Amino acid sequence: MKRTALGALVVLIAVSAFGAETQRYLVGTKRSARIGSLSKELSNPAERRVRTFSVIDGFAADLTPEEASALRRSPDVRWVEPVVERWISATASIPGAQMVPYGVAQVHAPETWLGRRTGEVNVVIVDSGIDATHPELAASYAGGYHVFEDAEPIDDIGHGTHVAGIVGAANNAFGVVGIAPGVRLWAMKVVDESGRGTMDDVITAVEWVIDQKKETGGHWVVNMSLGGTSPSIGEQEVFTEAAEAGVILVASSGNTSTFSNPAAVEFPAAYPEVVAVGAVGEEKVHANFSNSGPELDFVAPGVRILSTVLSGDYWMSYARADEKVIITKPLVGAKIGNVAGDYIYCGLGGPNDFPPSVRGKIALIKRGGDTFADKTRRAVEAGAVAVAFFNHDDTNYAWTLLPPEDPEAQNYPWPIAVGMSKADGDVLAARGSGRMNLVYEPDDYDMKSGTSMAAPHVAGAIALLWSLAPDATPSQITNALITTAIDLGPPGRDDLYGHGQIDVFAAAKMLVPSAFGPTTGRRILTRRRN
């Protein structure tokens, strides 16, 4: 009987000393790799952690350098490449009724909900898993796959749950709402508790999606809020197969850029088969951490994005001032609780900045000068019952009341103390005083920044479009987003913003105008002015 090509290759593996130091490799073969032939001819497959694939011809295994070299010389091998890492790209009941996060509004998803949705769409979150018990996600959760073990793809770090909420948090009377509420959400757990996995884990997840589409049909969108700096032949092969099967793939561009040193779009986003997404903030300006380059397709909101996280594992901090809800960050060491009353603006919180009127009230203080601990002590000594700090510039903020050079800070009875953005603080400071409610308590929602948060805005938009236009092809969906994108950089496509920020409502009206009634445009214009 003629031996298979893989069988011949396995002999090369089997004759090696299993005690030698190994590295994980992907091996592309010229014929199909099947676990059956491996189990017969590989003397110790468990020690080699062999993983075969159903879509691409090849396998992953732990090999010694000598084995890898021997396989590269084999006429039955197309390529051999080291396996590289892929990592996630990310750097409480919400007060009152349901909140529409600014990113959902910024891409004009709420206007699009007025259309007639007639198609069912599957969105697969290739990430850390999903908290299927979260009240925003439970009704939409459809199942998934755990690449590391025979178990449910339960989220253990919250990243995948946050991404899933951006895509499809329920449109209900509480919490937040996603871009495409009502889509079917699937979880592919491909990263561990440290947020890291490998490209063969990603390959396995995408193959699972291809198999599901072949078995059940329907529309499938894959969101990959993860990446790495090295390309992979095997990874790109499976993405090519997925694209040819009609699956739309979306990935984050990466978070390793700085103002002075822009970084290239990471993989898998950099593959031509994948929609690459960078991040902008609420002002629609490029986020300095967002990777860019010729592979970038779109940008979407990715700065301070509020979404779902693991139930009961997070703490929510916010301020309500003059009926406006301001998302804040608690200072490390601050008291947990809830306080309501008047606030008084106290400048930079210097020794002479606290008027007698601050007693029994909340001190509003601008960042700058002394430490937050020193300023807070002065506020307490002046009789303030809580402190709200605001930034002096537009940088991210994560502040502490426990500086290492202040050993006494650990035992000080700190009050509730939160931080907010410069934009929010400037408005309050200009008034000088007013009513404020500060809250720092456990909740199921949190704010994160990163291209990890930008990508699901696009994946959700694609799902929303497909639910409105179930007969559309993948290219028609993506072309509608390209044509209607809001150009934010130089005219036309550019490396910093791609085609621009997506506008899902404009894309929907272009793709399927019949989904919207004759008065829809007038209703939306009125709503947007408000």
Image: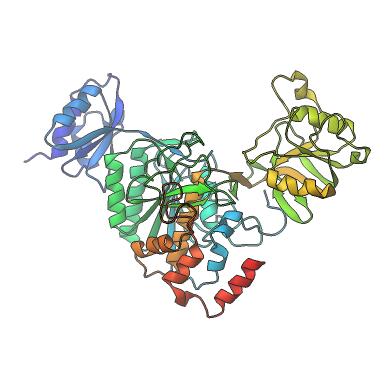
Q: Nearer the viewer, residue 423 or 24?
A: 423
| Tally of numbered discs | 0
Looking at the picture, the colour scheme in use is rainbow
**Residue 522 appears left or right of 351:** left
Q: Which residue lies furthest to the left in this view?
A: 1
Q: Is residue 217 visible?
A: no
The x, y position of residue 390, in whole percent, is 72, 40
Q: Which of 40 and 19 is in front in this view?
A: 19
Image quadrant containing the N terminus: top left
Q: Nearer the viewer, residue 413 or 19?
A: 413
Locate residue 75: give its quadrant: top left
The x, y position of residue 500, in whole percent, is 46, 55
Depicted 379 relative to depicted 97: above or below: above
The x, y position of residue 288, in whole percent, is 52, 40
Q: Which residue lies furthest to the bottom in this view?
A: 518
What residue is at 18 percent from the left and 30 percent from the top?
71
Q: Residue furthest right?
A: 356
Q: Nearer the viewer, residue 139 or 478?
A: 478
**Residue 520 appears left or right of 359:** left
Q: Is residue 13 visible?
A: yes
Locate residue 378: give its quadrant: top right
Image quadrant containing the C terminus: bottom right
What residue is at 28 percent from the left and 50 percent from the top?
240
The x, y position of residue 444, in whole percent, is 63, 47
What residue is at 66 percent from the left and 62 percent from the top?
173
What residue is at 57 percent from the left and 46 percent from the top?
303
